[in-house]
Image (cartoon, helix red, strand yellow):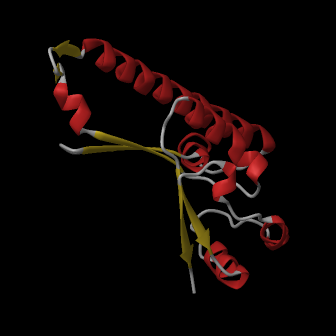
Amino acid sequence: IYIENDSISIEIFSPDSILADRYNYQWTPKSAQEAWAESYQNFGKTLLQLAKQKQSYNHESTMDGKNQIKKGHKMSKIKKILIWDATFLHSIHRAPILHICRGMNFRIGCVFMDTPLQKCMQRNRKRTRPPVPDEKIKSMYKTLLPPSTDEGFDVIFHMKTK
């Protein structure tokens, strides 16, 4: 999913979107694995493109005495936001993305949706696609480890749902 205006572009990477688009949200271990692999692949390609743009931009800048002359200044005005939309229950699942982004000197934020178990169960039952089994949701909820800035996030937005 890609959204852009004059000052910001947002790209969303979502294994669930791939499952919905490609498999009509028919979850199997194989379809889930393929959706996650494609999400990682798309994310990686986008990061590489951004890194090339950043490198190209830096090489196009020149020094004229004390003033830096920037060519292609439009790129510098557009903020690029990448969103990985998925449930990462543990820091070990979040680590690969954090490691890659940190290695490329990108700022990393996290939105943690803190939702009570009963609310998760209610929302799950109202889905238009087949619901996730209750036991799976309970198991995920029990093992959830909220994100921490110690993992490498620059900022965490903790959103509590009632």
Q: Is residue 89 left or right of residue 41?
A: right
Q: Position of residue 157 (x, y in %)?
A: 52, 66
Q: Is residue 144 left or right of residue 153?
A: right
Residue 128 or 67: which is nearer the viewer? 67
Residue positioned most to the bottom: 162
User: Residue at horizontal 80%, vertical 73%?
Assistant: 134
Query: Quarter-wise, where is residue 51 in the image?
Result: top left
Point out the image quarter for the C terminus.
Answer: bottom right
Point out the image quarter for the N terminus.
Answer: top left
Total number of numbered labels? 0
Query: Quarter-wise, where is residue 128 in the image?
Result: bottom right
Q: Position of residue 43 (x, y in %)?
A: 53, 33
User: Residue at horizontal 60%, vertical 50%?
Assistant: 16
Residue 24 or 153: which is nearer the viewer? 153
Reply above or below: 52 against 98.
Answer: above
Reply above or below: 78 against 65.
Answer: below
Reply above or below: 155 against 83.
Answer: below
Residue 103 or 126: which is nearer the viewer? 103
User: Residue at horizontal 49%, vertical 22%?
Assistant: 48
Q: Is residue 80 left or right of residue 34?
A: left
Q: Position of residue 80 (x, y in %)?
A: 35, 40
Q: Is residue 9 left or right of residue 138?
A: left
Q: Position of residue 119 (x, y in %)?
A: 64, 82
Let me know if residue 5 appears in the view. yes
